[in-house]
Amino acid sequence: MTKTSKFDSAYLRRVNCVKTFCTIREHGWISRSELADITGLSRATVSETVRELLEREFVREVGSDNTQRGRPPVKLEVNPTRFYLIAVEIDVGWIVVAITTLVGEILVQRREEFRTHDYDFVLNLCVSTVDRLLRQQSIHRDDVLGIGVAVPGQVDLNRRVVTFAPNLRWRDVSLADDLERDLNLPVLVSNEAMLGAMAEKWFGRGRDAGVLVYVSVKGGLGCGIVNDRSLFLGVSGSAGELGHMSIDPKGPECSCGSRGCWEVYSDEQAILDRAFRALRTSKDSLLFQWCIVENRRLTVDDIVHAANVGDQTAMEIVRESGWYLGIGIANIVNGLNPDMVIVGGCIAASEIVFDEINRVVQERGLQIPAEKVSLVPTGLGDKVALMGCIALLLDTLLEQPEGRLNTDSVREN
Ligand SMILES: [Zn+2]
């Protein structure tokens, strides 16, 4: 999320700060010399960066500070109780709010459901849920460094506006500023797939990946691209809308106005539509039993579950969905040459999907990028967007030299 040039000292400071903080977080108790060995930074740089993190109380010293021979050196750890972060995930019909430590450990979370697209209703629900959890945990606002919010839509990061969230039916809403005003805490808002990519880089399977693409398969299909430690944003912050690459120019119309977009064949609605079509001729399927006989509302989880227990109809639906995901991912692999593509959403829990994705990518991808890439499901489950909010907050906090999160610095100058 940096705006600094790759060659200035502020950029280097940020890189060193993030590297040091992440190494302390990942290793737990660690000495300064171990930090230098692992990060490859000089001892002087480690010493300077640690001093800054200690001053900000993001990390603390633990163990012996006695320098007598034979005593172990002072160890460092992320300060587990000094500050808190808040993550909010907004989706169609529900929100989840979580309070975490600086390590990213979720202390408490709460889900609220609703049946409206009304922006003010959802805004007020976010505010009341955050207030309620803070009171419940007896956490003072001064100890909260910031709130990260994930939305399924495009966000103008400079204006801090959700410009278009088709499934929520929101256009140009000032979510970050409204939450900041009502909660009196700094707020950052970003697209949930971009945050998924951040989560994988900070907490998930993409920690060691140079270039990683996160594919979020939910009500829509979005992607986030991380190059090194930074999100690739594009000129106006909407990079990663790969769900709208056309894979069939004469295909069905998409919500974006184009035709045959990858999303139309691959998002959760596409998977459910595939199931509803199959049910007409598959009366012996578990899905028919659940959906038609028992009149249950079918979910992608149900389809994956039925496929896992050997239901032939469900297995075919999942296989075909994996084929379409594979087509788009093969394009991504050819175009971006990533180390890793990580897929999130309920469908990612199916092994059949990954067998199919792997097969299509090997079959259709160019040889070198297809050989290099790892294709894996998220290991963060349904916490991926929440963890992405925490990653965004930590990344932005460490970019700033001091104090609490300053959201003025991310606004357009
Ligand atoms: Zn589209």
Image: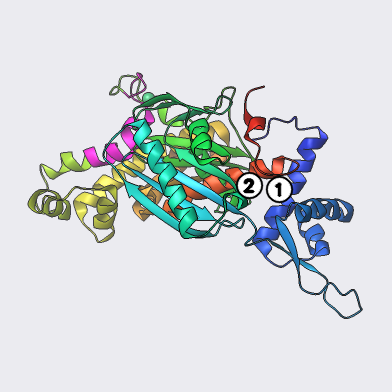
- The residue mark sitting in front, 1 or 2, is 2
Q: Position of residue 182 (x, y in %)?
A: 49, 37
- Is 256 included in the stretch rendered in magenta? yes
Q: CA distance from mark 1 to mark 2?
A: 8 Å
- At mark 2, the secondary structure is helix
Q: Position of residue 138 (x, y in %)?
A: 52, 59
Residue 85, relative to residue 188: is it above or below? below
Q: Residues within 10 Å of mark 1 (few under 14, many from 20)?
A: many
Q: Position of residue 262 (x, y in %)?
A: 38, 31
Contact between labelled residues 2 and 1, with CB atoms less than 8 Å apart? yes
Identify the mark at residue 18; answer none if there is no mark: 1
Amino acid marked by disc 1: Val
- At mark 1, the secondary structure is helix
Residue 103, relative to residue 389: is it above or below? below
The part of the chain drawn in magenta is 254-273
- Name the residue tied to disc 2: 394
Q: Position of residue 38 (x, y in %)?
A: 76, 59
Q: Residue at x 37, y 32 (%)?
A: 120
Q: Residue at x 79, y 66 (%)?
A: 31
